[in-house]
Amino acid sequence: MRLYVSAGSSGRSSHSLTADKLTSDEKPPSGSTFMDGWAYIDSKRGQTRAEFSFDWTTPLGDLSRGHRIYWQKQAGTQRDPISVTYSSGGQTFKASGDLSQDRLPTLGEHSLTVSPAQGPTASLPLIGS
C-alpha cells in the first residue's frame, strides 16, 4: 500500500502495515512524498478483511474553496470500503464510501464529502493532423 502526501506534511505514520525490507527507488511527483508498507491477507484461510490506516497533518490554508484529495482505485481491486475522518477546530467530520472507482474526498470549513472523481485525461495528437 502506498499513499502520496504533500512534502510539507508532518506526523506521517501508517498502522497495520509491515515496513519495506528494501528502500524504495521510486521518485514521487514534485512537492510530494509517500508513506508505504506491506500487508499479507491469506484468503485461503478465510481472511477476507484487513484494516490499514495512514495519519498525517497537512497545512490546508483557506478552506472556503475546499481541500481535495485524489484517491485512485488500484486496478484489479474490488469495491474496497473506505472511511475518512477529518478534525479541525474542535470538530470531527466522517465520511465513507468504497473504491469501486476513483474518489475525491473534499475537506471544507465545516464539512467532509467523498464523491466520485474523474480520472486524469490526456489529449494526444492524431496521426496526420
Image (tube, rainbow, N blue to C red):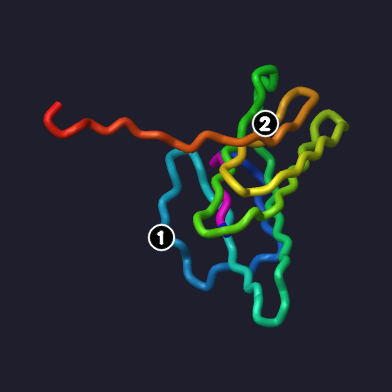
Q: Quadrant of residue 114?
A: top right
Tag 2: residue type?
Thr
**With respect to residue 72, does 47 lie above or below?**
below
Relative depth, front residue between 105 and 54: 105
Asked if residue 95 lies in the magenta stretch, the reply is no
Give the quarter of the image for residue 67: top right
Mark 1 lies on a secondary structure that is loop
- In the figure, residue 103 lies in which quadrant? top right
Residue located 65% across and 81% down the image: 44
Nearest the camera: 22 or 1? 1
Reading the image, the residue beneath label 1 is 25
For the residues labelled 2 and 1, the Cα–Cα distance comes to: 31 Å
Question: Dot 2 corresponds to which residue?
Answer: 106
Over which residues does the magenta segment extend? 2-7
Q: Which quadrant would the N terminus be assigned to in this image?
A: bottom right
Tell me residue 128's x, y (percent): 12, 30
Secondary structure category for the residue under label 2? strand
User: Where is residue 39 shown, x and y percent of the image?
Assistant: 63, 69
Is the residue 110 above or below the residue 42 in the image? above
Furthest-bottom residue in this view = 45
Is 6 colored magenta in this rendering? yes
